[in-house]
Amino acid sequence: MEVIMDTTYLETLYDLAKELNTADDIPGMLDAVINHLPKVLGAHYCSLFIRNPSSGELEIKAHNHLDIGDDPFIHVGSDQESIMNLVLARNASIIIKDIEEEIGVQNKDKYDTKSFMCILIKHSGEIKGVLNLADKPSGGFTKDDMIIASTISELLGALLARTSINTL
């Protein structure tokens, strides 16, 4: 099976790799992911949550959502209804074409579409966090999108395994 990728798509992915390589610190690397990955995939929103090893809760460490600002204390508790908790419970990454029909969660007004993709960030089987992408027009996320995001998540898993959550 021959796959021919769009040159612009590959160039945008390469721009992400260069940005990661030239980031000054780990928060800079996380910002590179949430700013470039949506461009590669054609999505509007991206957020990166890291699992706090003490509480088990997901804490936001980087995002491109203009409406939530720089609040460092956004977290997702295990008792909250969320796509990310569904991913944790299933221990598997997921693509959702319609959040309301597929899992019964009301879509927020800020999103133009009902498409989401949540990718687990793991290292040696241990969940380190979740990469959440949302609002992809033109049919939603695809398996190819999941492969690209999963590749980035694998790299993030290796990075996070070597750092403390307190340094992020």
Image: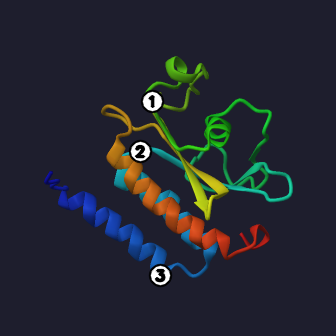
Which residue occupies 61% across, 44% down?
91
- Given the image, on which type of amino acid does mark 3 rest? Thr
Asked if residue 108 shows in the view, the reply is: yes
Between 86 and 77, the one lying in front of the other is 86
What amino acid does circle 2 point to? Ala
Contact flag, marks 2 and 3 (Cβ < 8 Å): no
**What x and y, as percent, mark residue 63?**
59, 53
Horizontal arrangement in the rendering, residue 108 relative to residue 6 (left or right): right
Q: Name the residue carrying label 1.
A: 112
Q: Nearer the viewer, mark 2 or mark 1?
A: 2
Residue 143 placement: quadrant: top left
| Residue that badge 2 annotates | 43
Q: Residues within 10 Å of mark 3 (few under 14, many from 20)?
A: few
Quadrant the C terminus occupies: bottom right
Q: Which residue is mark 3?
A: 22
Residue plotted at (76% across, 32% down)? 80
Residue 129 lies, with reference to residue 111, above or below; the image says below
Residue 48 visible in this rendered orientation of the protein = no
Q: Are marks 3 and 1 in contact (CB under 8 Å)?
A: no
Marks 1 and 2: in contact by CB < 8 Å? no
Name which residue type carries label 1.
Answer: Asp
Q: Reading the chain from its start, which is encountered first: label 3 or label 1?
A: 3
Q: How many marks?
A: 3
Distance from disc 2 to disc 3, alpha carbons, whole Å, reads 24 Å
